[in-house]
Image: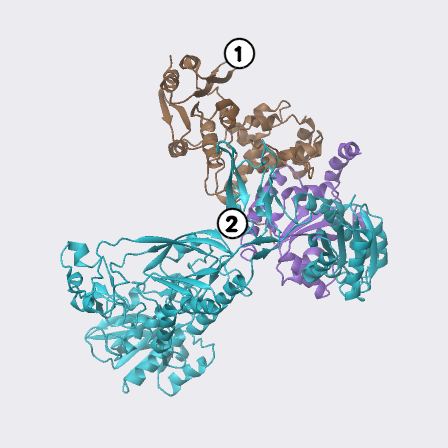
Amino acid sequence: MSKLSEKAAALLSEGTVGLVIGYEQGTHGTRPKFCRKAEDAATLILNDKCLNNIGGYLTKPELIGSGKVAVTATLAVMRTVVQLTAEHQLTDGNVIVLALDGDEVLQMASIDEIKKWLAAHPEDLSDENKALLSKLKALSREERWNFWINEMNKCIKCYACRASCPLCYCNRCIVEVNCPQWIKPWAAPLSNMEWQINRVMHMAGRCVGCGACDRACPVHIPLRLLTISMAGDIKEAFGVASGTGNIDGNVLSSFKPDDKENFIH
Amino acid sequence: MSKIGVFVCHCGENIAATVDCEKVANTAAKFDGVEFATDYKYMCSDPGQNLIKNAIKEHHLDGVVVASCSPRMHEPTFRKACSEAGLNPFMCEVANIREHCSWVHEKGDATTQKAIDIVRGLVEKVSRDHPLESIHVPITKKALVIGGGIAGIQASLDIANAGHKVILIERDPSIGGHMSQLSETFPTLDCSQCILTPRMVEVAQHPNITLYTYAELEKLEGFIGNFKATIRLKAKSIDEDVCTGCGTCTTKCPTKKIPSEFNQGLGNRTAIYVPFPQAVPNKPVIDKDHCLHYQKGVCGLCEKVCPTHAIHFGQDDSFITEDVGAVVLATGFNVLNTDFFPEYGYGKYKDVITGLQFERLASASGPTSGEIRRPSDGKIPQKIVFIACAGSRDPAKGIPYCSKICCMYTAKHAMLYQHKVHDGESTVFYMDIRAAGKNYEEFVRRAIEEDGVNYVRGRVARVYEKDGKLIVKGVDTLLGAKPVEIEADMVVLATAGVANAGAEELAQKLHVSYDPYHFFAEAHPKLRPVETNTAGIYLAGACQAPKDIPDTVAAASGAAVKVAGLFSQPDLVREPIIAKVNRMPPPVFSTCVGCFMCETACPYNAIEREEIKDRRSGKVIKTIAKVNPGLCQGCGTCVSFCRSKSIDMQGFSNEEMFAEVQALLED
Amino acid sequence: MSETNQEFEPRIVAFVCNWCTYAGADLAGTSRLKYATNVKIVRFPCTGRIDFMLLLKAFEEGADGIIVSGCHPNDCHYTSGNFHARRRWTVFRGLLDFMGIDVRRIHFTWVSAAEGAKWADIVNETVADIRALGPYDEYKSIASNFEKEAAK
């Protein structure tokens, strides 16, 4: 048994937690594993193939009940835990994070600990994302419009992007609001684009950059670029890093009197 | 289908000259949901209003659009008319076809078309309007006044004399504030204490005022009309009910060398002390930081000599809570008196003093009994220099503002000096003389012309000691920056007025805004100068910015009127144009997910947490946001911020605004 | 193109706050300043209330340009609604631009209750700018094809 499995098994057998959410090897890559008994933990793994953001399960009470839960965490999952706690969706101390430091298993029970770890392990954009972003930004506006309208044309409004996102936990999404009908329910370029603009605006300052939306998209729209671009804008304009569990308000529900802009005359 | 009435006003020729009003009415009559449309010469006139009222009754209208002047002008008029005809006033909208149309465009089809579009937008909006009821909030008719200087005294007396209860708290052992420290006051030279002490006594004796000295606000919860204040009563170590104020304890106390705060360090006091002879209440407190009993566990002399056994060493701080409907902030100011001026040698040379220290020297109740004697050797200074703008109007020092009172008190100081030291020589270094106020300029002229004060326009670069003299080096800019050097016996700095210690902390406790200098911010610099942005909290005096006594008293009375006005109503009636979090039947209760990220979007702290509990078990099912209708002012920032659209705004709802935008752009 | 553009009358919606810009526009009226008829004003209590979706809806409904205007920084009637709005527009505008939406068609301004003349100028400048850009056919094309038919 790996150290991770041992730790998870111990937490379960001691009764510290009632559930450990982690990853195991599946037929096609890794898949989520829900361990309720110590022996379930034997197959747990945690490596760079673990790309799903299992942090999203933490906001589903029907899945986790009301007791303490442990989650094996990549950096993206840790950011999710921190952000969800700042948004009052998780209670600090109720989620134990198990992470790997080399061979050693780290057990973090408080947001402060996780935040410290995250601060010491910053994640930069991948070279691929950087290249894609600068390529798009270098296009003319018309070209960008054509690029995105072409992408939006593909969208089938399946809302997999929403379902996969750990921060999309509203009981009623704006697309389900019909008084007024902000966004038309059918799949068409305009309403698809409006949906994405809303989704991305709602991620302002909150997106943890896990890329789940992008991987979930069945028609391969590069959705991550939208949030990455916005997070970059926010960082540049306000010096605020997105998805870091800022407890002093969201970037759009806080301000500084001397915030800078160059477009209001 | 709604039944909407459209009433197009000609406003004489004001609208009709460029807009074809009849065409607007005829076109509007064909809009979906419009039951009745007409035009009339003056809609706001009595016959015009009657036209609306009759149409409401005759056609059973459930919505009204008046196309006329700006709603900022006549919206209340038309809403009242609708209300009189039995229609909910918030079912009336005003289409602005005068200021935004007829007056700014030439006569023509485009202008008439724009008027039609504006009307169509509001017809669509009103058809989605909901009847709204004004919000009634109960009011606790008792005020809390924080700070017992002249501002707090005046506000308390004015509120109390209007027949309302007042709780006045003061953190020092006595009320009186800075005004009690002043010698004489400009521009009349009447004695400060002589005019102040009767009011201090009146406060103490007023049946409507409860005074707590040595007390500080611990916390304030609630909202306008309904605050709950927790007040810390610092231990005085005496039983005030028993103490007669005989003063035996203070004369016997062996610790006598504590610098007196009242005398600005120019005199001493004992550890058990009354700050000054006219103090209200005139009962001592024990300064625990200096008392031998508390510091070393010895002495206890005061306890032994007290004839009424009023000394209680075991006393602890206690807390009381008071329900109040309004709060007046009157916490005053302070003067910059640290080592802010190394170049002037303050703190290094004993004879470089602040203006407030000079007040104590000039005061008959002061350490020198009103004789101007310098602190170092008690000699009467033959040459004295006053430096105005010591700190003020100096962006480099971080105080770019003018402290406002210094020009006047410096003139007064120089004048008092000349009156007391007839052969003395006084010089004032100044940047500008700002003497705007009734009889102020005359007062300064009198100092210069009658009392022979030497005014030099220029700044002082340095003050240093040489052979027992203070050498003041400055320039006279009116003589082409000619260097001026004066060998002075004493230097008085007109130090800048700054926010009082703890102002920022208090502002945060009360959720009132403050400026970069920690002075409390008014709701509007011109039209709401004594209100804060937190409803029910008002400002009096120099806690807002440096102010002289008349301005302070005027502001205090202004704040008191605001409080009395609030208290004169049976309850608080507010327009229902506020945000609301949606509620729905179980098991959903609300679409709010309780992320509470809207909390910081609200400038008024109106967003609260509401726990939805299971009726039987009492278990919390869900915690959602709730907008406090007493606090919400209806800006709608939270509404636009809410991701799940769980907050909406009455009167400017998502549905209404959406429909208006769509209709405006319809062909 | 330039010939048709000169005849083109853009349709513009202005989203303004009640306390500053709406009052400023009132003042323009009281002062009898003349400006183009193309701009229609929607009154909001505060710029903080202006939902970004309403801007998209305006384009969908055929607006060629948009004005968003409120109180100058530090002048907000509600103390900070405009500060929140400023952040919202910064982020929103960046996203729209990244998606290729023509942000030159949205004019953001601060107009106080005393700036009637500025309001008149803003309207005229915006009308001239949008006229030069031409109708927003790009947006209208996606707004019209499927959406309009399906709505029937």
Label 2: state its secondary structure. loop
For chain C, the rendered hue is: purple
Picture residue at 47% right of the left edge, 56% below the top = B513
Q: Position of residue B661 (x, y in %)?
A: 72, 46
Q: Position of residue B7 (x, y in %)?
A: 79, 57
Observer-nearest of B25 and B588? B588
For chain B, the rendered hue is: cyan
List the residue tagged with mark 1. Answer: A27
Residue B110 seen: no
Callout 2 amino acid = Asp
Q: Residues within 10 Å of mark 2 (few under 14, many from 20)?
A: some
Q: Disc number at residue B401?
A: none
Observer-nearest of B80 and A27? B80
Observer-nearest of B588 and A242? B588
Vertical order, C39 against B403 (above or below): above
Count of picture labels:
2
Q: Quadrant of the N terminus of chain B?
A: top right
Q: Residues within 10 Å of mark 1 (few under 14, many from 20)?
A: few
Label 1: state its secondary structure. loop
Pinpoint the chain carrying mark 1: A
Q: Is residue B257 left or right of residue A86?
A: left
List the residue tagged with mark 2. Answer: A259
Vertical order, B382 against B82 (above or below): below
Q: Earlier in the sequence, mark 2 or mark 1?
A: 1
Q: Is residue B279 left or right of residue A158?
A: left
- Rendered brown, the chain in question is A
Callout 1 amino acid = Thr
